[in-house]
Amino acid sequence: GDSVTQMEGPVTLSEEAFLTINCTYTATGYPSLFWYVQYPGEGLQLLLKATKADDKGSNKGFEATYRKETTSFHLEKGSVQVSDSAVYFCALGDDKIIFGKGTRLHILP
Amino acid sequence: DAGVIQSPRHEVTEMGQEVTLRCKPISGHNSLFWYRQTMMRGLELLIYFNNNVPIDDSGMPEDRFSAKMPNASFSTLKIQPSEPRDSAVYFCASRLGQDGQPQHFGDGTRLSIL
């Protein structure tokens, strides 16, 4: 069945560092891909999405590109802030959505 | 617009008691999802509905769990009888349409079974 694998955390970076959180997937067909973010005490929020190969999703300085050849959807940000500290989930699907296990990100001031 | 509304936000009860979690989806959304989140198992899909009809309940752990959606603006997840291993954060999410549309999550119900 379809699945998502993302790098285990926690990931700890200093403010203004470059961020990459790896995500790879296994899927039949070409499902939509998502990154969600979860702040403490809250539900998941959509961060960005891409619906077909080579699409780039972007939001709040975060980017991810739908790579069919490497079955990847890595999340990147050029300069992280303390406020980016959260748990990030990679996900795929067009009807039922399958989530990765989440990567906790800590940004130090 | 109001987001997905879940109640209660916190529930503490003793094992063996019945627990009912409630969800009001975003108006106009036609799909609704129930998830359970724990440290050990991450985020698990329990059941989802399209147009108030249950489509996939394969994630419901056992017969103690049941979910209903009597109309487009309300859903319940019931656990009877509850057990300590049911302690988790339960999320409801709703979505407009299908084909790659994002889900919108509520803030969850933190359930503790003593």
Image (cartoon, coloured by chain):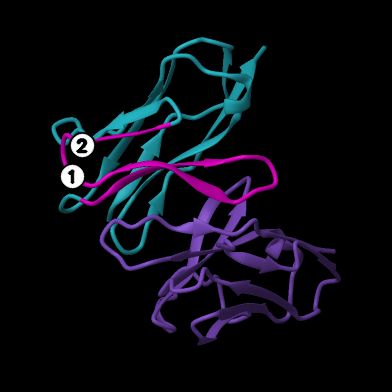
Residue A36 x/y as whole percent:
46, 43
Q: Secondary structure at mark 2?
A: loop
Residue A86 in the figure: left or right of residue B101: right
In the figure, is residue A67 to the left or right of B36?
left
Among the 4 quarters of the image, the one containing residue B109: bottom right
Disc 1 sits on a residue from what chain?
Answer: A
Specify the subunit that label 2 lies on.
A
Q: Position of residue A100 (x, y in %)?
A: 43, 44
Tell me the distance, in whole angstroms, between the alpha carbons under discs 2 and 1.
6 Å
Q: Relative to residue B79, is residue A10 drawn left or right?
A: left
Chain letter for purple?
A: B
Q: Residue at x 20, y 37 (%)?
A: A55
How dense is the environment of label 2, judged by Cα within 10 Å: few (below 14), some, or many (20 and up)?
some
What residue type is disc 2 on? Answer: Asp
Q: Which portion, as a residue range, is magenta?
A: A31-59
User: Chain A's shade in the image?
Assistant: cyan
The quarter in which the C terminus of chain B is drawn is: bottom right
**Front residue of this view, candidates A83 and B69:** A83
Residue at 57% from the left image edge and 19% from the top image edge: A81
- Residue highlighted by disc 1: A52
Query: In the image, is residue A89 above or below residue A80?
Result: below
Out of A15 and A1, give the one closest to the viewer: A15
- Dot 1 lies on which element? loop
Q: Which residue is mark 2?
A: A55
Q: Residue at x 23, y 47 (%)?
A: A51
**Residue A66 falls in which quadrant of the image?**
top left
Q: Quadrant where the N terminus of chain B lies?
A: bottom right
The foreground one among A28 and B93 is B93
